[in-house]
Image (cartoon, grey):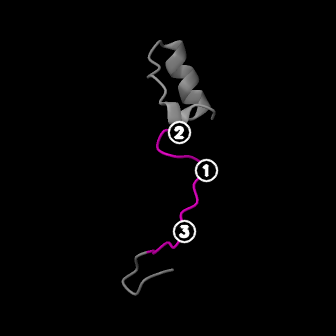
Amino acid sequence: MLAADGRLIASEVLAKHDENYMPPEVAEALARAGKMPPMPEAAKGY
């Protein structure tokens, strides 16, 4: 919904991923460079 002041107001947020998501190509590049951060338990299974 668009508010009178021009702000967009969402009643529902649809996301394909959460704050722990990392695109596969980024994960692969980090792994190759030996810089892959530890994966939180909640993010496993992507």
| Residue situated furthest front in the rendering | 41
Name the residue carrying label 2. Answer: 21
Res 22 seen here: no
Quadrant in which the C terminus is drawn = top right
Question: What secondary structure is found at the residue carrying circle 1?
Answer: loop
The answer to whether residue 5 is left or right of residue 19 is: left
The residue at 58%/22% (across/down) is 28
Direction left: furthest residue: 5
Q: Amino acid at mark 1?
A: Lys
Horizontal side of 33 relative to 28 (left or right) equals left
Q: Nearer the viewer, residue 11 or 35?
A: 11
Pointers 3 and 2 in contact (C-beta within 8 Å)? no
User: From mark 1 to mark 2, how far is it between C-alphas?
Assistant: 9 Å
Helix, strand or loop at mark 2: loop
Residue 14 placement (x, y as % from top left):
58, 60
* Nearer to us in this view, 20 or 24: 20
Residue 16 part of the magenta-drawn span: yes
* Residue 1 in the image: above or below residue 24: below
**Marks 1 & 2, CB-CB < 8 Å contact:** yes
Total labels drawn: 3
Pointer 1 residue: 16
Say above or below: 40 vs 14. Answer: above
- How far apart are labels 3 and 1 at the CA level? 13 Å
Disc 1 crowd, CA 10 A, few/some/many (<14, 14-19, 20+):
few
To which residue does mark 3 refer? 12
First in sequence: mark 1 or mark 2?
1
Q: What residue span does the magenta drawing correspond to?
A: 8-22
Q: Give amino acid for label 3.
A: Glu
Crowd band around label 2 with a 10 angstrom C-alpha radius: few (<14), some (14–19), many (20+): few
Residue in the foreground of this view, choosing between 31 and 19: 19
